[in-house]
Amino acid sequence: MQVRTRHTPAFGVARLLLAPGEAVQAEYTAMLATSYGVQVDAKRGGGRSRSWPALFTAPAEGGWVDVAPALPGEVYALDLDGSAGWCVARGSWLAVTSTLRSEPGWPGFHPLFGAEHGFLEHVSGVGTVVLACCGALDVVTLEPGEAITVDPAHLLAYGDSTQCRLRAVSQSAPQSVRTGDGLMLDLAGPGTLLTQTRAPRSMAASLAR
C-alpha cells in the first residue's frame, strides 16, 4: 500500500493506493470514497461501540480508498520495517495494512497499566499505519538520556526504543489509565515520538457546542 496525503495540515485526507487484490483495514466512518470496484466488508460494533472496522479489498486492476479523520488536523503515514514496533494512542489510526499486528494488551504495557487495557496499543510488523492527528503534528527526537513530559491527550505515538513512565498529576485528583485523565507521561531517549497540538476530546467538545 502507498499513501498520498492532501489538504494538510488543516483538513488532512489520505489516499490509500492498493495493488491488485490488496486489502487494508480502516474505520468505515472514515471513508470518503473509493475507486470503482473496491470491495467493502464492514462489521458494525455491538452495543454502544462507535467502532465500525471495515476491510477494503482492491479488484484485479488495483484501486484506491480515501479516508479522513472526524476532527480537523493532519494525517500521517507511519511506516514500520519490522525491526521495532510503535506504541500508538488508542483510536488514533485511520487505516492499517493487514501485515501489521495490533496488541492493546502488549506485555510491554504491564509496567504502565497493570492488567488493564490503557490508552495505548502496540503495533508491530512490516507495513503502514495511517494516523489521524488532531491539529498539527510534531515529530520529537530524543537523544540518549534526554527526557520530556507529555500530556497523554497530546501523545500520538512513540517508538519501542523510547523509555516511558506514567505518573499522576496529583494524588488527590481522579485518574484513568483507559483515557489518560489525571496522568502524565515521562518519556526518555533515545527514541522518537509524535505529538498533536490539540486534544481530540477537547476539540470534539468545542465543536459540539
Image: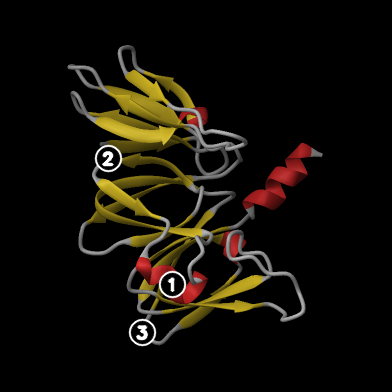
| Residue assigned mark 1 | 110
Give the alpha-carbon distance from disc 2 to disc 3, as whole Å.
33 Å
Helix, strand or loop under label 2: loop
The residue at the point 49 percent across, 72 percent down is 114
Asked where in the image residue 154 lies, by quadrant, the reply is: bottom right
Does label 1 or label 2 sit earlier along the sequence?
2
Are dots 2 and 3 in contact, CB under 8 Å?
Answer: no
In the rendered view, does 119 fall on the left or right side of 103?
Answer: right
The answer to whether 147 is drawn above or below residue 64 in the figure is: below
Label 2 vs 3, first from the N-terminus: 2
**Disc marking residue 144:** 3
- As rendered, which of 25 and 17 lies closer to the eye? 25
Which residue position holds label 2?
Answer: 98
The amino acid pointed to by label 3 is Pro
Q: Quarter of the image containing the N terminus?
A: top left
Disc 3 crowd, CA 10 A, few/some/many (<14, 14-19, 20+)? few
Residue drawn at (58%, 65%), measured in percent from left and top? 177
Left/right of residue 1 with respect to residue 52 in the rendered view: left
Whole-Å distance between the Cαs marked 1 and 2?
Answer: 26 Å
Residue at point 60%, 57% (across, down): 197
Mark 1 lies on a secondary structure that is helix
Q: Which of marks 1 and 3 is nearer the N terminus?
A: 1
Do tag 1 and tag 2 residues touch (Cβ < 8 Å)? no
Mark number, residue 133:
none
Instruction: Report x, y in % for residue 145.
Output: 40, 87
The x, y position of residue 133, in whole percent, is 52, 49
